[in-house]
Amino acid sequence: MMLNMDKLFHNFSFCLFKKSVLLACLLASFMVASNHAIAAGVTPYTGKKLTQASELAQNDHLDKAIKVLTSYDPKADYDKAFVNRVLAIYYWQAEQPKSSISALRAAVALKALEPKVQWQANRMLADILYSEQDFSHSAKEYRNTLAIKYTPSAADKTQFKKDSNEVYFRLAAAYYQQQQWAQVRSAVIKYQAPDAKKRLQALRMQVIAELRLKQWGNAEGTLSNLIRLEPNNKAWWQQQISTQLQQHKNQSALETYSLAKKQNLEFSANDYKSLSQLYAQNKIPERGARILQEMFKAYPETKTIDNQKTQAYYYQMAREWPQAMASWEALAKRDAEYYWPLTQLYIQQKQYNKANQVIDKAQPYAKKSEFSLAKIQLLYRLEKYNDALAEAKRLNEVQPSDSAQTWIVFLNNKLQSQQPEPSQDGMTS
């Protein structure tokens, strides 16, 4: 279940990101266009080149705009950085992401832009790296973006807060794609989701990271939030039960299961079976057996011999002897080979008369030595000592063993102790 959920979320998050990257780049292009006229930091000649390239780009001549800027080599670091930043946007619009990445790297490496523009360029570089599935370098550039010392003006403060928050989400997503679970959680818990949709995305990443890290307590809390957002998603309920069992919160797990049923979630046969296995693995086999019974009721076709056998074992593991015997009895009626475990259970539970009624039916399905030893024990418990001794002797002739010989000695002594002692006049008393 976890792997399927992982795959679905990976595909969804990547598609979402490609759209958001495009929007970020377009926004940046508008900013650059408006900055051309007011970019007082660049030299007049650089400003002229930027204006020329902008006019070409606006008239759908991106190739010519790119040629204008690539053929120009400004001297000042600020001019170089600014030109490369504009060039990166044109490359992106021309669907040349590798060239866009190269230009942005050149721009940010100079560290010559104003802090705000440097921050935007660095974030754009990280976004494009992510869109190209270079998740390792993308994460690095998101970290670099967050490390830039930029104090926004009062007018920019709200937007900067929103943008910084978004970078934490994207950093978590980049770590997620690399399955670096500790880093995913560290980044995503710093993210403040602006709406329910983004909160759901963040919580999905967070819970998968916590489950991978086996942080059962943290995962339990995250799953509670997911259940509140998606109460009809049975995967969250199942994972919640699993995390509670991992913490030995058996009562909490049972309550969660009960709430899931009240939610009218439709459990498939596989859901029932997985849940029963989960309880058995966490040393609550009795609950596992009862869930199988619910499965049989909901899906009668699942009452196969194999599933009934699993249920019988679960009842036996739980020491629920009446239910275990009933389960083996039902199985034996369907397939005679189950008379053997039924016989063994009858003897174990001192149901000797019942065992005597079925033991001969079990003989073809048991090993010779095991069957004979069970029959000797049964005959002894029924106080049929002569029959038990005869069985022990037959076993010892066919398969000599210490067990058979011990029974022979024991039963001979038992029979001798029951013989009446002779009186002094030679008559038995």
Image (cartoon, grey):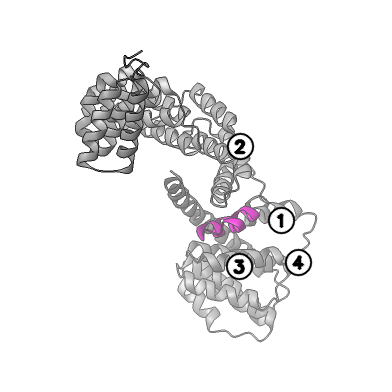
Residue 17 locus on image (x, y percent): 51, 55
> Which mark's residue is nearer the viewer, 1 or 4?
4
- Identify which amino acid the numbered label 3 is placed on: Lys
- What residue is shown with label 4? 149
Q: Along the polypeptide, which appears first: circle 3 or circle 1?
A: 3
Q: Is 335 or 352 nearer to us in this picture?
A: 352
The span from disc 4 to disc 2 (Cα, nearest Å) is: 34 Å
Q: Residues within 10 Å of mark 3 (few under 14, many from 20)?
A: some
Q: Along the polypeptide, which appears first: circle 2 or circle 3?
A: 3
The span from disc 3 to disc 1 (Cα, nearest Å) is: 20 Å
Q: Residue furthest front?
A: 425
Residue 328 shows up from this direction: no
The answer to whether the residue labelled 4 contacts the one labelled 2, judged by CB atoms less than 8 Å apart, is: no
- Identify which amino acid the numbered label 2 is placed on: Asn
Q: Is 291 or 393 nearer to us in this picture?
A: 393
* Range covered by the magenta-colored residues: 169-187
Residue 168 shows up from this direction: yes
- What residue is shown with label 3? 140
Residue 225 circle label: 2
